[in-house]
Image (cartoon, grey):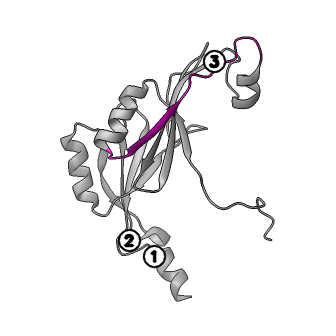
Amino acid sequence: MSGGLPGLAGVDHIGFTVPDLAEARAFLVDVLGCEYMYSLGPFRDDHGNWMADHLDVHPRAVMRQLHFFRCGGQAIFEVFEYAAPGRNTTLPRNSDIGGHHVALYVDDLDAAVAYLRSRGIRVLGEPSSSSGPSEGQRWVYFLAPWGMQFELVSYPGGKAFDRQRAAG
């Protein structure tokens, strides 16, 4: 054993909170092509601290509903909509603590960018080419309708890191 988390087998899902589940579902299914799987909720604890103790949210927070989506046959997104006293509605930037993005692999980056733009999705700049260990990869960021950052990546010939590891 290498001293890591016992039994770690992989990433199960990625969870994020959105302001409007209907808007998120339309984007994830109709624009990105994810598969809607199922919904749960609402969840609340009107008298105790379960929400705070288990989810680190305000004790009176209400998880209105959550949806599960499968994207690209692999990744599972668990998408929440909350109502909570004092919740922060400002999205973090990548440079902020807690900043994040979801990267999606595509076979043809240029076709994917053109498609997003044709759907009115804000793409941040033009695709960039990586260098160093990531040479062979091209990437670009785009924004979901609620402002969350996503990234498209493509490296059909592999990355330099992978080629060097295979050779050595």
Q: At 38% from the left edge and 71% from the top edge, which residue is drawn? A: 136
**SS assignment at label 1:** helix
Mark positioned earlier in the residue sequence (1 or 3): 3
Residue numbers of the magenta segment: 32-48
Q: Which residue is mark 1?
A: 160
| Residue 128 position within the rendered picture, expressed as x and y whole percent measured from the top left | 34, 58
Locate the N terminus by quadrant: bottom right
Q: Which mark is residue 77?
A: none
Mark 1 or 3: in front is: 3
Q: Quadrant of residue 26?
A: top left
| Residue 119 position within the rendered picture, expressed as x and y whole percent measured from the top left | 22, 39
Q: Amino acid at mark 3?
A: Ala
Q: At 36% from the left edge and 28% from the top edge, which residue is drawn? A: 23
Q: Amino acid at mark 1?
A: Ala
Q: At 42% from the left edge and 68% from the top edge, which residue is drawn? A: 131
Q: Nearer the viewer, residue 148 or 56?
A: 56
Gap between marks 1 and 2 measured at Cα: 6 Å
Gap between marks 3 and 2 measured at Cα: 45 Å
Q: Which residue is mark 3?
A: 61
Q: Which residue is mark 2?
A: 136
Above or below, comparing residue 82 to residue 69 in the picture = above
Locate the C terminus by quadrant: bottom right
| Residue 127 position within the rendered picture, expressed as x and y whole percent measured from the top left | 30, 55
Pointer 3: residues within 10 angstroms few (<14), some, or many (20+)?
many
Pointer 1: residues within 10 angstroms few (<14), some, or many (20+)?
some
Tell me whether the residue at label 1 lies in contact with that at label 2, contact meaning CB atoms closer than 8 angstroms: yes
Q: Look at the image and say whether residue 84 sits in the magenta stretch.
A: no
Q: Look at the image and say whether residue 41 sits in the magenta stretch.
A: yes
